[in-house]
Amino acid sequence: MTAIAHYRTLLLDSSFRPVKVIPWSRAVTLMFQGKVIEVESYDRLIGHPSVEMFVPAVVALKQYLRYHPFKVRFTKRNVFLRDGYACQYCGERYPAVELTIDHVVPRAQGGRSCWENVVTACEPCNHRKSDRTPRQAGMPLLSVPERPRPSLHGHVVARKVPAEWNPYLGKRATA
């Protein structure tokens, strides 16, 4: 069973578009202040002697809020998150300290440092590929690198999201 502190709540705007992820306790406060409505809940009860309720999974703001999706920043950490900390050549997962960023079209051949041209690679695979393209090195990519969609916080979402959030996030993986 997950500790109560690990529960998070998806905050939606009044049009049911994702705004951000907040702690469940903040969601409860917003509910009691009358600023949000509960849309979905987890199967976990909380409360004290006079009040008992389920932990809110998704809440929506009652008032309109302008929607400004965050552009995902191009960082080494976000590339690792996008690729699941797995080498895109051999498929093995590694801790961040054992990973590198590899340019699919090497910089020596005019390749740019952008989402569509970099992948996570382990040091042995990156060294073996050297300054060649995957085709030249005979090392096919396991997935095509692409720019992540705008996210809730401006970074790549690493964890799988709770199933209760899926109807509000579009096409995402479930927990």
Image (cartoon, rainbow, N blue to C red):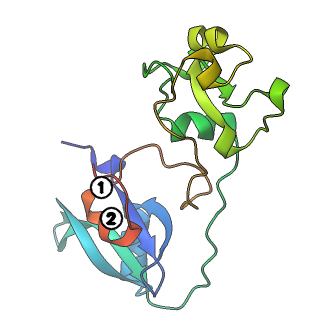
Depth check, front residue: 90 or 6 = 90
| Residue 34 vertical position relative to residue 96 in the rendered view, above or below | below
Q: What kind of element bears circle 1?
A: loop
- Counting from the top left corner in percent of width and height, residue 134 is at 60, 24
Judged left or right of residue 33, residue 166 is left
In the image, residue 157 above or below residue 50: above
x, y percentage for residue 107? 81, 28
Q: Position of residue 29 (x, y in %)?
A: 41, 73
Instruction: Give the residue at x 33% y 53%.
Output: 7
Tell me if mark 2 has few (under 14), some (14-19) or many (20+) residues whose alpha carbon lies within 10 angstroms of its own.
many
At label 1, the amino acid type is Pro
Q: Is residue 136 left or right of residue 110?
A: left
Residue 172 at what x, y percent from top left?
37, 57
Residue 154's disc number: none
**In the rendered image, which quarter contains the N terminus?**
top left
Pointer 2 with pointer 1, Cβ within 8 A: yes
Which of the numbered marks, if any, corresponds to residue 165?
A: 2
Question: Residue 15 occupies which quadrant of the picture?
Answer: bottom left
In the image shown, does 115 or 41 lie closer to the viewer? 115
SS at circle 2: helix
In the image, taking residue 82 as reference, residue 127 lies left or right, namely right
The amino acid pointed to by label 2 is Trp
Provide the residue designation for mark 1: 162
Label 2, label 1: how far apart the Cα atoms are = 6 Å
**In the foreground, 48 or 3:** 3
